[in-house]
Amino acid sequence: MLDVFRRYLVLLSGLAVAVTVPLWLQDIKKVPKDELESRQAIRKARLALWNKPLTDGRCAIATAYFGPGFARLVRADKDGTAHYAVLEGGSRKVPMNALYQGDWLRARFGAAETVTLATFKSSAAALARASQLCPPRLRCLPGRPGCDATPPLDALPAMTGLPAASHLVPWEGARPVTWPSTGPAPASTDAMK
């Protein structure tokens, strides 16, 4: 009788451990609700602040094309200048676009924090929003004080290492290339008979 009691006790304790371990692990992974809410509030406040048009300081607008698709408006603050970048190309046909865009942002802004402000159906809409956030009187143009004197970074050399003058045929929807003519057209076969 004592043997049966021990077996039931071991079985029940094993069952209790099996039920409580996942719950215990879930409690460890769970972020306290108030901490999660405070993080969300900080993120919303920062996004609301970054989505307001600038009233002072310097700003710049850059664009990068990674293929057709929607456009993403990204903001990064670097060296006291607010940079707005319109990244076009988010189609699902090219899953590597997200990595290319991240590499371009790191090459352009370094370790500066980047925040996606919005996603638009076209680059024209994203550029319109960027021009609202960065008014013309504050834009960095060559010779303006507070602007970096380095020329803007071109996406092609930064991402591929190729010179900017080389023209690549896009991989999607490429036009057929005609061969150059090497002289007069050959006579028709009827004339050869």
Image (cartoon, rainbow, N blue to C red):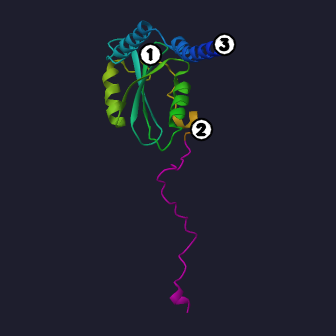
Mark toward the viewer: 1 or 2: 2
Residue farthest to the right? 3
Front residue of this view, candidates 116 and 31:
31
Q: Marks 1 and 3, how far apart in space?
A: 81 Å
Q: Quadrant of residue 142?
A: top left
Amino acid type at mark 2: Thr
How many tags in the picture? Answer: 3
The stretch of residues the image draws in magenta is 165-193
Q: Residues within 10 Å of mark 3 (few under 14, many from 20)?
A: few
Residue farthest to the bottom? 193
Look at 53% across and 82% down and name the residue there.
187
The kind of secondary structure element at disc 2 is: helix
Amino acid type at mark 1: Thr
The residue indicated by pointer 1 is 81
The kind of secondary structure element at disc 1 is: strand
The image shows residue 138 at horizontal and vertical percentages of: 36, 18
Q: Residues within 10 Å of mark 2 (few under 14, many from 20)?
A: few
Residue 103 shows which numbered tag?
Answer: none
Look at 52% across and 50% down and name the residue there.
169
Residue 1 shows which numbered tag?
Answer: 3
| Chain-order first, disc 2 or disc 3 | 3
Q: Marks 2 and 3, how far apart in space?
A: 78 Å
The image shows residue 173 at horizontal and vertical percentages of: 46, 53
Residue farthest to the front? 1
Q: Is residue 152 above or below residue 67?
A: above
Amino acid type at mark 3: Met
